[in-house]
Image (tube, rainbow, N blue to C red):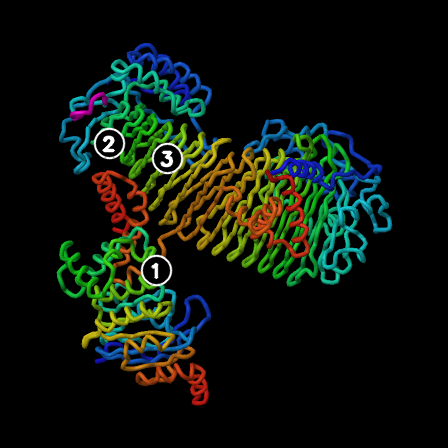
Amino acid sequence: MALLEIKNLHVGVEDEDIKILNGVDLTLDTGDLHAIMGPNGSGKSTLAAVLAGREEYEVLDGEILYDGEDLLELEPEERAEAGVFLAFQYPVELPGVSMTNFLKEAVNSVREARGQDELGSADFLQYMRERADMMGLNADLTKRSVNEGFSGGEKKRNEIFQLAMLEPKLAILDETDSGLDIDALKNVADGVNKLRSEDRGFLIITHYQRILDYIVPDHVHVMLDGKIVRTGDKDLALELEEHGYDWVREEAAAAA
Amino acid sequence: MSTTALDTSVRPEDRFISAFEVNHGEALNGTNASISKQRTDAIERFAELGIPTNNLEAWKYTDISSVIDRPYTLPLAPERPSLDTDDIAPFLIDDLDAHRVVLINGRVDEVLSDIGDLPDGVVVSSLAQAGSTHPDVVEEHYGKYADFEDEALTALNTAFVQDGAFVYVPSGTVVEKPIFFLHLTATEQDLLLQPRHLFVAEDGAIARIVEAQHSLSDAQTFTNTVSESFVGEKANLEHYLIQDQGPSASQVHTRAAQQKDDSVYTTISATFTGEVVRNNVTIEADGSFCESNFYGLVVGKDDMHVDNHTFMGHVQPDCSSNELYKHVLNDESTGVFNGKVFVSRGSQRIDAYQQNDTLVLTKDAEIYTKPELEIYADDVVCSHGATTGQIDEESLFYLRSRGLSKRRARILMLQAFAQEVIDEIQLDSLEEHVAERVRTRFSSYFA
Amino acid sequence: MSTSETEYLKGKASEEYKHGWYTDIESEKAPRGLSEDIVRYISKRKDEPEWLTEWRLKAYRYFKQLIDSGHYPDWAHLDYERPDFENMRYFAAPNGQAQYESLDDVPDEILETFERLGIPLEEQKALTGVAVDAVMDSVSVATTFKEKLREKGVIFKSFGEAAKDHPELVRQHLGSVVPYTDNLYAALNSAVFSDGSFVYVPEGVTCPMELSTYFRINEAGTGQFERTLIVAEPGAYVSYLEGCTAPMRKENQLHAAVVELIAHEDSEIKYSTIQNWYPGDEDGNGGIYNLVTKRGICKGDNSKISWTQLETGSAVTQKYPSVILAGDNSVGEFYSVAFTKGHQQADTGTKMQHIGKNTKSTIISKGISADVADNSYRGLVKVSANADGARNFSQCDSMLLGPDCGAHTYPYIESNNPTAQIEHEATTSKVGDDQMFYCHQRGLGEEEALKLIVNGFCQEVLQELPMEFAVEAKELLDIELEGSVG
């Protein structure tokens, strides 16, 4: 059974007459890393938001199966507990919410859902330190409020750090590479590569090919106007880099 | 208890005026001359001003007259309700190692108090006692900072003053341990209490005062407190107030402070319960290079009504002030904030900041906020801000996407909102106490 | 600053009010004082229908009741002597004529008066794209481009004419936004209002020109009480501007206007004011008391009302142009620059009342105070229980030019809706030394630098003015700043 199966997904914005996704089909097996590429406004980030359960979008048609279950039935926190993780394109600042407090609540609620014991304070701090070390995260960041005053690169690294803390089955990275300089990009990619495993699937959403130099995808999809118009292996990303999206657009138009 | 029941057949003002006439020269005497001599002027001024109504700009959003217009009894002679340490135990603050004074119905209870050893010259006692032991200090400071010219309730308090708390920290003295005043109301009658406190920190003195108000009964009470603080040159006074008298208690609580050169005064209130609670905070920075900080937290529930009314008077140059009030309003609770920053002509180089933030959680909760600046000097940086809104949806989604339930995510966001004020509490044990009370309250919102 | 520079600026300061002259023309005036007879006299002189006379009388009786019971509105941060209502004239018609049939009947002195103010009344000389209603004392002298506007169905005429030509429209809307019981000065205006403008834009019409009314007080001892009413039918758009000046006089004169705006579904009214009444002399003698009630209602869904004001004149200004946001998704805006110097006092701001759902309001207020002047922002943002999704943003900044002036901010926020989002920010500061130094370093003198910085401070507001008037506004502000340095 596939980890994630998206079938003929149509999505619009609630209360408005706007359609963003127009029949997306995608199957992702556990252990695989898929990249979705596409120009701005093609619907990539909307797909990520719908997977994580953002309420302002309305699913008009189609279904999403996660581990064979209907994902759309679940609240955002139930998805997290079931092992879906979204690394946000714009991580939210939470002034007054300490990283430690936040992650302890998050980790324990996910553990509880998996039938694991809650971590006590000492064990949790130990675990957090280990993961911070592993991800090369400056321990000082864990002493601050969530994302408050973090630089762009720190915010993105913090998302990957949380991924490491929560150990999801499906990790969705929404333009995690955007706005990063080359060092920060490498750092984020290193983190992701460390976390790749046989029992985890990745869906990486990106505008640019460059992150795929460091994270080698098993499959690459191109999204245009709310549909996946082309699927291939890692070479597809290189072709896109060379020819741009217009090339795919023309092809898609010719095929239609 | 020797008491005078207020005569509800006449208008409220006249009840007090006649109670004053009946008791003047008897129950009200026996205090210090400098306290007594202001009584007559005060009751006359009270008669002229009358009890404030909503027609007064300063009382536009808080109807105190209907709270005062109830059949209260005035307790006029000391009588000790039979309480022991078990009765007060629930109201002590864990890990707060302090000089403890317990006041029952506005009077110091010697038996329940545990003042312990104080540094040389430091006095922690009842105001009535200080009237005879330290008449010079009382003479110098009593009635000097809480002006009753424009405040009817301060006038009323001044007319009827009997007892309250007294702290005197002489020049250059540091009081290491906080001084804790536990104010309890213990009564079966509907009481109207008027405690009066005086806190004096002379030049270079450092002290921390913690006041907590609680109630042992459900009787309807109205407490009209006036406290005056003097912060001498280079002195540092922290003044905390926990308001938790229960849903049948109302109060007007006036804190008036005067600061001298290079001093720091910080006052923080946290309001948990009360039917109608009105706080008047007045700080006059009557010296250069003063720092004044005032913060407040209101965690509203049911139909409680809390009004924080503040005045920051900058009458000397080169001072700074920080003010932050936060309201979380649930159920049918009402929050009012009216703060004024005043900079007098010639008070140059003032840095004043004022902020009021409110979260309105239900359709029946209400907020009225009016932050004011009145500035008569040009070389100043003064700003104020006010926001009212709800818990940020984007933040809630972020938390939920990490596995926190909607309820936990909301509670965490509320705690984060309140944290900014709680962080200003410099006493760890008190900070934890307030944080815990706040956590419990927020958890109850979404039970 | 050098002595000669100071002298120069002092000289500038005393000559700065350039509209302070008086036109010598015979005027027919009502006797001093106020009574039912005076109210009837005004109504009769204006040839008004019976219902309007009665309405005036009701307003007068309400006014008298307020005065007799000692209800004077003195809550603002203003210190001035109450006008002597018994010693004032409530009607003055220059040349003894209450109205003019055509421009040919208007005497040369009056035409010259407006020409000298930069408002030529002959259409060929006029500013293109702007239609003007010129009001002197109690009388509308002329309204330009009436015919051109008529082609589009837009009615733009003096209030007096409108009351006769379109009685049903006037009767339906007069007092519907500002009832005469609103406040003392609204009652007084309703009783004795003289001329003013009436604008009606029919459904779906975008008014092809800027509409403008120019008010001139000329006669001594009179008050001016104009009344403006603007109705925008569904889908209509209109931009309207008022300007005002008065001669220099030792005694104070009263200006108590009422403006009502009604915006139906999908319509927009943009109302701009350049207020330059005589502010009084440098010792604080004379000047206009500008006590005005302005309010608009966004009646229909998706409607919008925007107030922009540049307040530089008057000895005392008290006005709060407001918006009642009744329609869903309606928008209210208030942009204000208030400049007080000398002995001027201003207490101005707005009221935004959110009633409809998803209503939005924006308040940008810039107060500048110099000399011994006092400048207050006072505003209310009120969100009622059913106004789900209401949004407000307010920014109120004050700038102090000199150590003896005052700047104050009194915002009121009242909300009992959990979905409302309200944000208020205010700052008070002076022109930064570093800003001045930076300008000096780039070769700008004291006054040039100050003008530049103050103009920048006001930019957010000034850019809201119609283009035709933006230049005038900037010049006015520059003139105000001359003599404010030091």
Question: Could you say whether the residue bearing mark 2 is in a helix, strand or loop?
Answer: strand
Work out whether disc 1 and disc 2 sit on a shared chain.
Answer: no
What number is the disc on residue A151? 1
| Residue behind mark 3 | B291
Parent chain of label 1: A
Quadrant in the picture for the C terminus of chain C: top right
Does residue C393 belong to the magenta stretch? no
What number is the disc on residue B85? none
Residue positioned 23% across, 60% down in the render? A106
In the rendering, at what x and y percent does residue B156 appear? 38, 21
Q: In this view, does B343 lie above or below B191?
A: below
Magenta residue span = B112-123
Residue C185 horizontal side relative to residue C408, left or right: right
Quadrant in the picture for the N terminus of chain C: top right
Residue type, mark 1 in image: Ser
Q: Is residue C104 above or below residue A154?
A: above
Name the N-terminal-most of marks 2 and 3: 2
Residue type, mark 3 in image: Glu
Q: In which quarter of the image is residue A71?
A: bottom left
| Residue behind mark 2 | B215
Work out whether disc 3 and disc 1 sit on a shared chain.
Answer: no
In the rendering, at what x and y percent does residue C212 appear? 70, 52
Residue positioned 76% across, 50% down in the render? C119
Parent chain of label 3: B
Parent chain of label 2: B
Between B255 and B289, the one lying in front of the other is: B289
Looking at the rendered image, the disc whose residue lies closer to the viewer, 1 or 2, is 1
In the rendering, at what x and y percent does residue C345 appear? 60, 35
